Amino acid sequence: MLNFTDTKNPAKERPKKPRISVNKLAEYISAGPPRRNKIVSDCKTPVAFIVTRYSEARTAVKSYFEQNSPDILNAAIEVLEKKEGTTDFQKNDIKNSIALLNSLLNTDVSRFNGMEIKIAPGKDAILEIKGVEISVNPDLYLSQTMKGIKNIGAIKLSLTKSGLSSDQQKIVALMTKRYLQANAGKDEVVNGKMCFSLDAFKKSFTEAPASDAQRMRAIEYACEEIALWWGRV
């Protein structure tokens, strides 16, 4: 079933340290001052009700990659087509979920041939930069042995119709790579060409940029600013 929650619940407990999701961080870096202030405020005082958009679609997308089976997407589309939402939001969510899955069905995923793909566990995957906890939370982990060396990567999904800009996707892919580098095993090598931000609606796979010094400076500056603003909003 689509996952909708009560919109009358009070605010959640505030995070003890500055915290932001990787997708929101990417938005923050390209936003103007008023929007940046709002992003920090929303992160500091998250609401208890969060309507989970595309919940069934997200589950289907993960299973599709893990099992390498278009049948999973087709089955999910069939289930969604039989649903009848009772509100405009629910009807929109069903419609957009179907569009998202159809878009992915028509996306070339041959680049993943030969890779082992596993659904990431639900635990919080955090990377801390300049005192700010960044929730990276990859959706899928990738691995492939090349010349006897285990190469690893990950996919971070963006399932919003508004999507991410090209540069925002590069930031998400870069942070995904950095998270893996901080947590890779001794026998693993993080391969930037296997670290992706996937904008499903746009059929856009963006891998981590090879040259990342300038973007890392922008990320570090943004985190310093978020930490400063955290006590003021």
Image (cartoon, grey):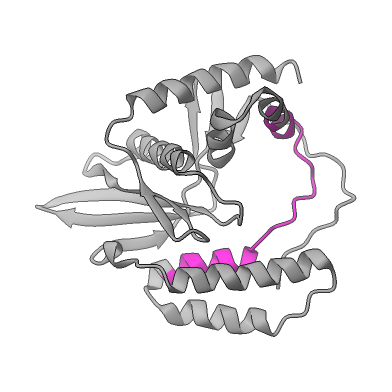
Residue 68 placement (x, y as % from top left): 37, 73
Q: Is residue 197 left or right of residue 160?
A: left
Up the image or down, 155 lies above or below 224; here it is below
209 or 43, nearer to the observer: 209
Q: Nearer the viewer, residue 26 or 47?
A: 26
In which quadrant will I find the N terminus? Answer: bottom right
**Segment colored magenta:** 39-64
Residue at screen point 33% across, 36% down: 181
Residue 206: image location, x then y, percent? 38, 49
> In this rendering, is residue 64 above or below 221?
below
User: What is the count of numbered marks?
Assistant: 0
Residue 96, image x, y percentages: 64, 67
Q: Along the horizontal axis of the image, is 193 left or right of 99?
A: left
**Residue lying at 56% horizontally and 51% vertically, measured from the top left:** 163
In magenta stretch: residue 36: no
Magenta-drawn stretch contains 45: yes
Q: Main secondary structure of the magenta part?
A: helix
Q: Is residue 23 left or right of residue 206?
A: right
Residue at position x 82%, y 67% from top?
A: 88
